Amino acid sequence: MEFAIFLPAVLTAYYCLSHRAQNVLIILVSFLFYGWWDWRFCGLLLFLTLLNYFSALVVHSESPHRRVYLWVNITGNLAVLGFFKYYNFFVQSFATALSHLGLHPYLPVLHIILPIGVSFYTFQMMGYTIDVYKGRIPATREFIPIAAFMSFFPLLLSGPIERAERMIPQFQKPRIADSQMVASGLLLMFIGFFKKIAIADAISPEVDKVFSHVASAPWPELVGGLWFYTIQIYCDFSGYTDIARGVGRLFGFKIMLNFNQPYFATNIGEFWRRWHISLSTWLRDYLYIPLGGSRGGVFKTYRNLMLTMVLCGLWHGANWTFVIWGTLHGIYLCCYRLLSGKAGDKSTQKPRSMIATEAIKVCSIILTFNLVALAWLFFRAQGMAEAIIYLKGIILLQGQCENYLFYFWRLAFFVGLVLMIDIPQYLKNDHTVMLEWPWGLQGVAYGLMVILMILLAPGNEIPFIYFQF
């Protein structure tokens, strides 16, 4: 309800101001937006903004120590992220390792509150400084556009992790949201709220129920719970992204696409080109390629893939389950690269019939979906012990295989809701394709979505899953 008051009030003031004043307003309301959760972390946001603003100016200069300054900036950003997010994780892991050697040192654990969205805005700010150093963009001496970009409230909590080369020019010039941008922005927000409320939040109790008794749940329920969570996290995160992109359009900004029907991917490489695109491209450009990418031979390529995905897992959270999640995706990518390399030249293969081609495509989508679902187990589990018990229950066909027809019909219902949104977008490669529909069809679709949100909404507020990162 606070956001329902906040957004119209800010938009009204925004379009009453000049371009420069609009940027100042964005900074002020973004800090208000962030400080509404905990005002103390506004200081952290300001510190990182100043750090990256001045670092970019220094690395853009002709100083022979540019590289040193860059590493000081990277160290500073990662030190902030590491302290708030990983201090206790590494201390506890180190203490556990020493205890196996018979040593029991006193290593203090701090009661640290994790600043919401710190992983997202740290990477976004750091990317700006690195881009300046690489010569991709010039350093901007005007502080206001830079500060507005680094604190822009739709991106602040869960991304997308935008690039300075895309966004800063938009902050530097006047913006006008025409009728098409407003219509598409409102539609994206509407779709985002539908995904969050009618699908992700409605599924959440089912997922929580399964994960609350993994030791006794029958194996069909464990499998179904994993599929439910696979849908939940997609609709929860992509729903937030749709809302963020929609809000950005109301202010006249074009924010990058972050999800592009990832569960329609036919292989794991395509999945990562469609899932959390802003993070996957960030890791590719700022980690995988600097490590050497696919240059330097097969071994180094696989090493770079594994290291990138393990760090991707660690970025998501300070827990060994996230490391396993990243490791699994690294193994998937290495196996896919190995198998696709052995497939040979497709030009020498016999052409398949259309039916065979489509059948193979469908099977590939199903296989990729289930590989991703398996990895989500470690993402959702509270610890390694729970994940192992869960996996063991499925492998050993735990419990009585009773009539779970209604359970899987419920799952099919929510899959249908996802497909209702994703299939039209996929076929037209346009996330606002509904605007092209006849008015009558649009009215039916919007009315049905509103009714479903009312009927399926849980009685309690459920935070976005990625707020914890």
Image: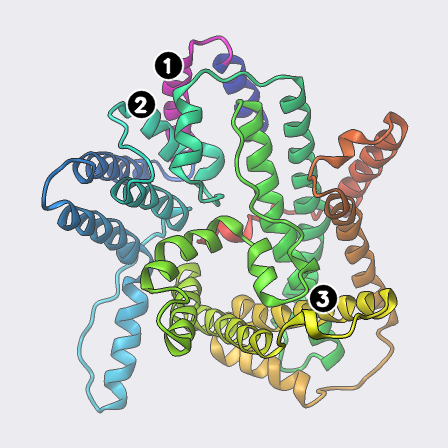
Which structural element holds mark 1? helix
Depth check: give the residue in front, 137 or 205: 137
Residue 266, position in %: x, y?
A: 68, 65
Side of 125 relative to 158 (left or right): left
Quick one: label 1 or label 3, which is nearer the N terminus? 1
Q: Residues within 10 Å of mark 1 (few under 14, many from 20)?
A: some
Which residue is pictured at 24% across the width and 25% down the height?
141
What's under tag 3, amino acid-wise? Answer: Ile
Identify whether 122 is placed above or below 252. Answer: below
Q: Residues within 10 Å of mark 2 (few under 14, many from 20)?
A: some
Residue 4, position in %: x, y?
A: 59, 27
Q: Residue furthest front?
A: 348
Q: Which residues are magenta?
A: 15-35
Which structural element holds mark 3? helix
Depth check: give the residue in front, 348 or 287: 348
* Tag of residue 365: 3
Residue 163, position in %: x, y?
A: 41, 40
Residue assigned mark 2: 144
Quadrant into which the N terminus falls: top right
* Tag of residue 20: 1
